[in-house]
Image (spheres, rainbow, N blue to C red):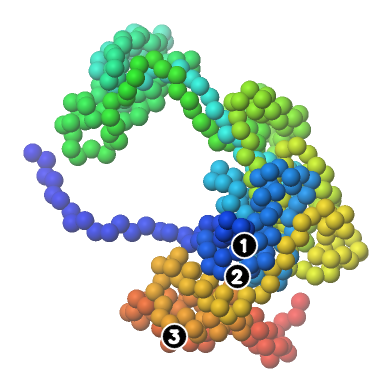
Amino acid sequence: MASIREVPTSPAKRFERIGAHTHIKGLGLDENLHAVKIKDGMVGQEKAREAAGLVVKLIKEGKLSGKCIILAGPPGTGKTAIAVAISRELGENVPFIQMSGSEIYSSERKKTEILIEAIRKCIGVEIHEMRKVYEGEIVSLNINTAPHPYNPYQRVPESVRLTLKTKEEEKTIEAGASIAQQILGSGISEGHVVQIDAETGRVVSLGLSLESTKGKTYDVDTRRKIPRPEGKVLKEKEFVYMLTLADLDEINARSRSGSFFSLLFGGSETKEIDTEVRMAVDQQVKEWVDQGKAFIHPGVLFIDDSHLLDLEAFSFLGRAMESELVPIIILATNRGVTRIRGTDVKSPLGFPIDLIDRAVIIATHLYDAESIREILRIRAKEEKIEIDDEALEKLTNVGAKSSLRYAVQLLSLAAQNAKAKGREKIVGKDVERVDELFMDVTEAAEYLKKYEERLMVH
């Protein structure tokens, strides 16, 4: 008998990365599109949230064509949070792509190619396909073998005969060498519930049947166990695939590329996808939509620090906004009147005037102390940090004096300091300690000015 001992169960620990906006669930509006002070992870910025709510209504009614959204405000005022909240309001299947304005500059690819790819990654295509499949529990399995054509001492699968059973009927089918090899390669045997595509012959194991002998006998088993399927063995099932236009572009490009390189490595020799490929994909998607086989989910392309885009990129975005398949484009900037990159012309926000004219502009403002306190409380809950009232008040004062981002950073650092002292809850001393060890922007500037003569000058 095998030696098996039980190990005491301990809580499983796993690494969790808490993003800066994982707590955002929506814009936090009521049924009248009025902002609630604290809702869906959003705090403050009532005017900006209500403006975003009206924009979401326009998007859902398809009336924002040819326009983009500009989020303008000082650093740390929730521009990214509002962009994330807009995508959450549009639905679960809505793609959200975030990039910086500096990401379009590459020595290997054109700026417009990077922007096109980002735009097409933001357009989701929900494809519905009805396929005939054989589905059931394998109650009998016989694989016939034959001598290998090049090695008579080796036998290979030639065909398979299997009986599939559901709660309603039982059917025996025969298949060729391809399906037999898949069954052997996947380790499928009697008792498994399988799906066999009647057209392509693709075999998928869904798990062990609970009604089978193996499903009842093996108590210690890592394989998934499912009930025996219902209905007929041969049935039509709807399969739903969620892809983006960029995924379809890549699939189409690989299928068209018949080069030796692509045959060996499955990739394309070129780093850019041909315009004809994208036009063919667009035409195919339109046909699927007309036939009711696919649904388009326009997503959100959020370009932060968009003042880093140059005049060519702005011109391309202006043209892209007029096309049929285009996502919701949100540009965020913290600049005032500044020079448009690539020119000597100064303009508001660093954007061309013609782009500003066709945009919906939403302004964000600095947070007050009450909003900072509530945001810190939400972040502490999101990061599973316990904090007492005194420490929360000290962090609120730091955020009001310096910035919200600096206060959120000190929150995580104070939690580590408390843990090092053997405490589970952050107290006021922890906040004071980390505030002494680290500098905010103002303190860093004063420090550099103090030792300006001793610092290196480039």
- For the point 80% across and 42% down, the residue is 322
* Residue 37 seen by the camera: yes
Q: Secondary structure at mark 2?
A: loop
Front residue of 44/343: it is 44
Task: Check residue 170 in the rendering and tell me which mark sits there, or answer none.
Answer: none
Give the quadrant of residue 258.
top right
- Image quarter of residue 302: bottom right
- x, y (%) of residue 445? 68, 84
> Are the residues at dot 3 and dot 1 in contact (C-beta closer than 8 Å)?
no
Q: Which picture quadrant has residue 78?
A: bottom right
Residue matched to label 1: 34
Circle nearer the viewer, 3 or 1: 1
Quarter that holds the N terminus? top left
* Residue type, mark 3 in image: Glu
| In the displayed structure image, the side of residue 338 where residue 217 appears, left or right | left
Q: Position of residue 252 (x, y in %)?
A: 65, 28
Q: Which residue is mark 2?
A: 44
Helix, strand or loop at mark 3: helix
The secondary structure type at the circle numbered 1 is loop
Q: CA distance from mark 3 to mark 1?
A: 32 Å
Residue matched to label 3: 390
Q: What is the three-letter code of the residue carrying label 1?
A: His
- Mark pair 1, 2: CA separation: 12 Å
Q: Earlier in the sequence, mark 1 or mark 2?
A: 1
Q: Residue at x 66, y 84 (%)?
A: 442
> On the picture, is 206 further left or further right than 95?
left
